[in-house]
Amino acid sequence: MTNTTDTNAPALIAWQVRENRRGKPIWTRVGAAWHHSNGSGLSIQLDSLPFEGRLVLLPPKTAATAEGGAA
């Protein structure tokens, strides 16, 4: 991963992934993560706390890949 200390863009996006009644995954963005300025570790900001499913951290999509949906 590249160091993003020179921008405000997050290094990773936090997603809650849970399954609906039919077993299809539902992806909900719940936060983001940024690299520490010293390059060691991440700071994670969650806008909501998922109580079910799993938490997935993925790199943000670029403009070229964003047309495909959440994940």
Image (cartoon, rainbow, N blue to C red):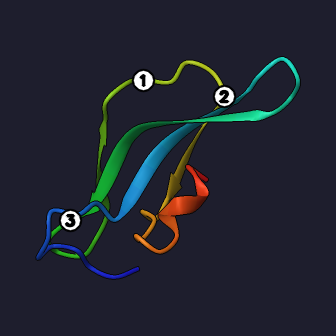
Mark 1: which amino acid? Leu
Residue 43: x and y, percent? 26, 52
Above or below residue 10? Residue 43 is above
Q: How far apart, in angstroms, are the residues tagged by discs 1 and 2?
A: 11 Å
In the picture, residue 49 is in which quadrant?
top left
- Disc 3 + disc 1, Cβ < 8 Å: no
Q: How far apart, in angstroms, are the residues tagged by discs 3 and 1?
A: 22 Å
In the picture, residue 23 is in which quadrant?
top right
In the picture, residue 41 is in which quadrant?
bottom left
Task: Give me the residue at 33% from left, 82% from top.
Answer: 2
Relative placement, left or right, of 39 versus 13 is left
Mark 3, Cα crowd under 10 Å, few <14 / some 14-19 / many 20+, is: few
Relative placement, left or right, of 47 versus 66 is left
Task: Give me the residue at 16% from left, 74% from top.
Answer: 38
Q: Assign a secondary structure to mark 3.
A: loop
Q: Assign a secondary structure to mark 2.
A: loop
Residue 59: x and y, percent? 46, 65
Mark 1, Cα crowd under 10 Å, few <14 / some 14-19 / many 20+, is: few
Mark 3: which amino acid? His
Sequence order check, earlier mark of 3 and 1: 3
Which quarter of the rendering shows the N terminus? bottom left
Residue identified by numbered label 2: 53
Q: Assign a secondary structure to mark 1.
A: loop
Residue identified by numbered label 1: 49
Above or below residue 67? Residue 5 is below
Q: How far apart, in angstroms, are the residues tagged by discs 3 and 2?
A: 27 Å
Residue 60: x and y, percent? 42, 62
Above or below residue 69? Residue 28 is above
Relative placement, left or right, of 8 versus 53 is left
Task: Give me the residue at 50% from left, 53% from top.
Answer: 57
Task: Give me the residue at 47% from left, 74% from top.
Answer: 64
Residue identified by numbered label 3: 36
